[in-house]
Image (cartoon, grey):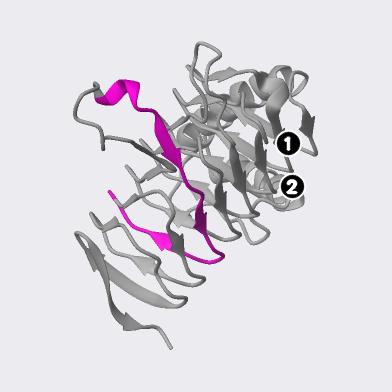
Amino acid sequence: MGKALVTPLKSAVQQWVQRQGKQRSFQFDAELEMQDLSELAVRHAFWLVRGLIWRLRFGHSAGMVMIASGTHIRHPRCLRVGKNFIVEDYVEIMALSRQGIVCGNNVTIGAFSTIKPSSYYGRNLGEGLRIGNNSNIGRYAYIGCSGLVTIGDNVMMGPKVSIFAENHNFDAIDRPMHQQGVTRQPVVIEHDCWLASGVTILAGVTVGRGSVVAAGSVVTQDIPPFSVAAGTPARVLRSRT
């Protein structure tokens, strides 16, 4: 189809996205053609329909919800979301927990991610997860939030980030480790952090505001605010200030 149809369609969709508040300066790439726009529109319309159905089961929803195919949300009454909540393909969210799963505005959960605070069998309820405004969980992430995990505003995560808020106990050698229970400790990712691809955050860690953690790092201790950290275990390379 000609530009005479593509241009007004682009403009209409751009204005709609901007009004939702997800990206107030949203613009399509200039090279997108009508076929591309049509495929995007159909897919996102499908996500919106699924979102309309799912949000009826949520504990709270303040605005637009988009849920992609293959997504499983267990105990959705324990999930509370703000405006513009987007869940991509094949995400699994186990919302049952003491404090629930609470998301601010403009939160995206990347494809194939898992959020799991509790056992699937009703034992050992975990604490849950808090995600601030304008933050995302990248593709293939694992958020083990049996201890409370708090993610601030404007946090970026690359693919395959893992967060674990508990450790298995193993001090006794006369009993199998799976019988010794776990120790839960909270994890905090403060505002405006970037966790690059493959980062692992272990229990009890706080990543300070404005910090960057390099790809593949394993964070075992607190990272001060505005730091650049890397390595296994991660250490601070420099301060952004």
Q: Looking at the rendering, in which quadrant would you find the C terminus? A: bottom left
- Residue 55 counted in the magenta span: no
Q: Residues within 10 Å of mark 1 (few under 14, many from 20)?
A: many
Relative horizontal placement of residue 238, taking residue 105 as reference (left or right): left
Q: Position of residue 233 (x, y in %)?
A: 22, 60
Q: Residue at x 79, y 32 (%)?
A: 60
Report how far apart the C-alphas of labels 1 and 2 lie in the structure.
8 Å
Magenta region, residue range: 177-198
Relative horizontal placement of residue 86, taking residue 142 as reference (left or right): right
Describe the element under mark 2 as helix, strand or loop.
Answer: helix
The three-letter amino acid code for the residue at tag 2 is: Gln
Which numbered disc covers residue 4?
Answer: none
Describe the element under mark 1 as helix, strand or loop.
Answer: loop
Depth check: give the residue in front, 121 or 195. Answer: 121
Depth check: give the residue in front, 98 or 77. Answer: 98
Tag 1 near tag 2, CB within 8 Å: yes
Is residue 159 placed above or below 146 in the rendered structure? below
Name the residue carrying label 2: 20
Q: Position of residue 104 (x, y in %)?
A: 69, 48
Relative horizontal placement of residue 51, taking residue 35 as reference (left or right): right
Which numbered disc covers residue 64?
Answer: 1
Is residue 136 placed above or below 225 in the rendered structure? above
Q: Position of residue 238 (x, y in %)?
A: 30, 83
